[in-house]
């Protein structure tokens, strides 16, 4: 089979390396180049052999049909323009072009919600990790108008450290994280809120989100525990999700609350829903788990590339 | 100084061993016996030497002035009666005699809230670990009538594994817990709800609690992230807690959200409060952290014993 | 492609589940059945769908061309006989038929050392995890007579907890293993010594092995640090390993000492060799790392099945 | 009781903070100042209140009777001179003045071996963490001439991450260390070798040491597994250690190999000895465990300060 050449900008971070590893296993893609300015000249071992990082300035952009940008927030937008000018399609993993961050209207690659806009799209803004877990969990309720108007939906979520990247920082050292747990960016201060609010508004949701992320002493995985005030609790609790995701290969519904172990190294979002006893306000508890580096970053980027390029959406992705 | 002789029933579990270790360091208490049926004959190393576990049936109850029961839920109540009949005071760490579990009215040893009832009390029901963290965080709001009537307070909390005891269970093996995170007892099913609801009602709170515990890959510590709908957000955010806990040696108020590392091996509850932007419903975020084995179990039991026996409340406790 | 039907006995343990997962990804094998007496009726999720555990007694042995036994040591030998009597080939992952444990001469599936005996073999004893790491590291020296005669080779090794299986045991609980490290089976008492000694003797090594295993607070992986007294240190340090493993797909030689992260989830043994300064006795340090569940168990079992069945040796294995 | 004023230079690292915490609990010492250039102005919470870091240049050296230097290797020696010139005694935790590193003869604070030289000493070089564990394990054999002449003693040791300090480094990030294990400084390259060789030579040992450190995914603790060729194995295996350490408060002999959990947060070295079966060369296995921050750094520094100042040696130390 002919393999489509692709490139990765910013390939030495956690998401960038995951991308390279997934591309190496992908039967329809070929890794033409991988850039990493500070580590240029270093080799990255892959199942298909190894690749040598080059400087981003030296990337032969026109040798790729599609380029993934895993460059840092702030630095990515400029490179996306340069790549587009050179010809290739782009899947941008930074937040630079996501809704709420940019005035440009760029298709938002939460694949299950926006697939029609992604087909043949020359540019896709890949979602943040927390928004992937939380929006896939909420969308079936929002689309059906089931969330109570004006209510506050409480999304308490916890992530492994790879969500914070691999630049050395004192608070991410092993000695600080092991046997520890804490909230951060509290009070609705996290960078992922704009894309969540924008998506909820597009789905005509009229409620507020209160999002509190926490740092877990694990490498990978996100679990979101979401409390949703509803007008009434449906008899068939899971029906909104079953209907919405009937044919989705990468959403799985579970009876028991998902654990990180259920989703790590897989390109899936696993969702469970529970009713709540002993409260007057009708309420649903929705749990959603993903691997922040796979469905929350590199895996979903490949999924979007597959859709853009007209390949089978599941190609090369661990289910 | 004369040391008051005390005993520990059920001393081989995590809370029981922590009790023995704290008693060994306590300048006013002397460990007269420690029982553990399955491990009888084994030695427990302590800073004051070591003690040999004896069978609970063989405990010389009348040699102690106060007995701590760390026996399992269900098995403790009967032993509490036997100890009381033999004379000594009792601090019971099980849930058997806590409000909501028993028809007896036993003083509930959340020391900061119930101190007057605990002085010279012959029997004290020591609170659960989650209720300690959550009730100390909520009490200042409840007492001041600040929680919105009829609202749902969302308490998402996470605990280290020692909260689940040390009996071998498949889901608590290292290989299952490491790099994992999950909710359990979801939908308001946890055994700690009755004592929380009872305490809120006694404080004249008229709201519902939605409590979702999670299991962390750490040994010790609880962090509760609590979302509280309020009628209005006070200008001086921390004032309810500052007023309530002005002279409390074991409650500390923090500006930044507490981390487990701030409280582990200490008999403190550390609380921070934040306002929330971007939500229409006035809301407070309250964070509360404790060591589940110290302020959440053995430390608070010693604190209650100190109060009951007329010792300085802080004696022998790591602050 | 026609897929060869295979079965797994004892499929609910760590190695058994790893086997099922690898078979599900294998393009030449089809999982006909998986047995687990205590968990019969439970489903095991696999990338190819899910399979329901059946009782071992109910296994349709004659539907498989090859059966993997992941039954416990002591229980496996009898089932190996029953399977052989029913027709299928067997790869036995237990220690029952390994050299030093059994009077039967069963081909020992350390593939790189014994490949000719494994081709078309109806029965293969799959090696233990520690022996895989240690023997692959030592074999090039032993075969070339480079280890000093009569010397003691010191093999200090450390393993993740999955090497101990998933039966609930107090000392393997998360609370006991986290932040801990200890040696076990010390003084040459470990069950894996006989197969190591037997293999060294077959390779005409005349030296003693001192093997001390340690338990790491990680799920997977073995690292062996091996001190080898030699008659003289070769100028070209790595040449024995380069010659021995020139065409081996699953042995990789490294300049830097291998880390667990280099090998986890891969069917490889990664080896590095260093000279030692400041000692009078010429000495080599050999480091060897594997994933105990892959190259140390299920992966090597598949590798051996591939060789026995005449498939490409690397088929279906993560390199 | 009058408390002797002491200061800490370099108080923001792991060892420096541990020192401050121990001094705060010490009934005979008072923390006069704590310096940390990069974090000056920050508060360090202590059980006795909190202390504000000042710049090292601003330290009121003459207000202390003894100063602990926890400054980095290379930077400490100069400050030791300045402190000595100002009057106070010094316990230096860096390697700058240890035997093998300096031409000056400074008493080496491995307290159990060198106590007479430490009494009233104005300057003490505190040992490294690995040397503390390894030398205390070996000394009884060396002093009795029991190690085989010319032999290689193999010391494979593993340490938690706090041994590497708390400066941000890529390879010490949580995501790199969790679920990992690796050797480093291999081939006798570690900075702790000179002090070990010097001490062995002073004890008239005529053998070579091969020391290989490893990095554990834990915060604290060192375990050394030491293989010692001996002329003959004594019948009463533990007698050399029992004789040597009969009255030592901080050395404990164990029957079972020590685990990190046995020693963490304690100022002890725990040692076990085993014979080895199946080897021709008579050999002992010696296991030694310490907390690298307590007996391996700050605790031993306090122990040495107690000896120098004429306080009870055990004062303020967790046993």
Image (cartoon, coloured by chain):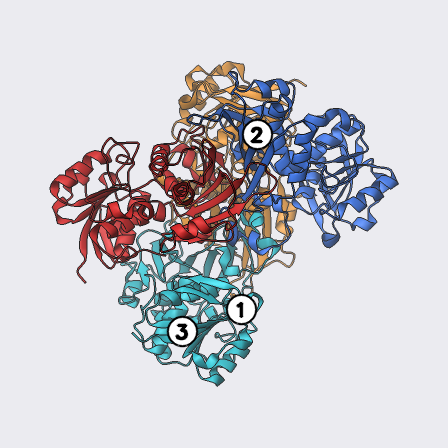
Chain colours: A blue, B red, C orange, D cyan
Same chain for marks 1 and 3? yes
Distance from the alpha carbon under mark 2 to that under mark 3: 55 Å
Q: From the image, state whether disc 2 or disc 1 is nearer to you.
A: 1
Pointer 1 residue: D36
Instruction: Indicate the secondary structure of the residue bearing disc 3.
Output: loop
Q: Is residue A116 left or right of residue B133?
A: right
Q: CA distance from mark 2 to mark 1?
A: 57 Å
Q: Is residue A28 above or below residue C1?
A: below
Which is more N-terminal, label 3 or label 1?
1
Instruction: Give the number of the disc on residue C302.
Output: 2
Q: Label 2 lies in what chain?
A: C
Picture quadrant of residue D28: bottom left
Residue A122: x %, y % from top left? 82, 33
D111 with respect to B124 (left or right):
right
**CA distance separating discs 1 and 3:** 41 Å
Q: Nearer the viewer, residue C211 or B238?
A: B238
Other residues around mark 3 within 10 Å, as few (<14) / some (14–19) / many (≥20): few
Work out whether disc 2 and disc 3 sit on a shared chain.
no
Q: Can see residue A166?
A: yes
In the foreground, B21 or C52: B21
Name the image quarter holding residue D127: bottom left
């Amino acid at each position: 089979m002919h393999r489509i050449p692709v490139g990765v900008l910013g390939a030495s971070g956690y998401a960038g390396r995951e991308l390279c590893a997934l591309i190496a296993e992908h039967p329809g893609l070929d890794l033409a180049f991988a850039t990493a300015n500070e580590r240029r000249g270093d080799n990255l071992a892959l199942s298909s052999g190894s690749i040598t990082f080059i400087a981003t300035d030296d990337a032969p952009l026109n040798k790729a049909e599609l380029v993934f940008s895993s460059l840092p927030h702030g630095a990515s937008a400029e490179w996306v323009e340069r790549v587009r000018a050179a010809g290739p399609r782009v899947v941008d993993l930074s937040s630079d072009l996501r809704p709420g961050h940019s005035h440009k209207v760029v298709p938002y690659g939460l694949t299950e919600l926006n697939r029609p806009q992604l087909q043949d799209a020359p540019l896709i803004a890949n979602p943040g990790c927390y928004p992937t877990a939380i929006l896939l969990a909420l969308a079936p309720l929002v689309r059906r108008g089931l969330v109570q108007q004006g209510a506050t939906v409480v999304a308490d979520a916890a992530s492994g450290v790879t969500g914070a990247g691999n630049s050395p920082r004192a608070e991410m050292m092993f000695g600080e994280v092991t046997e520890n747990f804490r909230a951060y960016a509290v009070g609705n201060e996290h960078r992922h809120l704009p894309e969540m609010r924008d998506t909820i508004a597009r789905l005509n949701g009229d409620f507020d989100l209160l999002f509190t992320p926490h740092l877990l002493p694990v490498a990978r995985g996100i679990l979101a525990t979401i409390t949703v005030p509803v007008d009434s609790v449906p008899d068939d609790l899971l029906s909104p999700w079953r209907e919405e995701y009937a044919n989705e290969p990468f959403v799985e519904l579970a009876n028991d609350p998902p654990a990180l172990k259920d989703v790590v190294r897989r390109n899936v979002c696993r969702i469970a829903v529970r009713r709540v006893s002993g409260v007057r306000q009708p309420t649903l508890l929705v749990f959603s788990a993903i691997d922040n580096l796979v469905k929350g970053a590199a895996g979903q980027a490949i999924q979007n590339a597959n859709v853009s390029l007209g390949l089978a959406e599941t190609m090369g992705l661990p289910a």
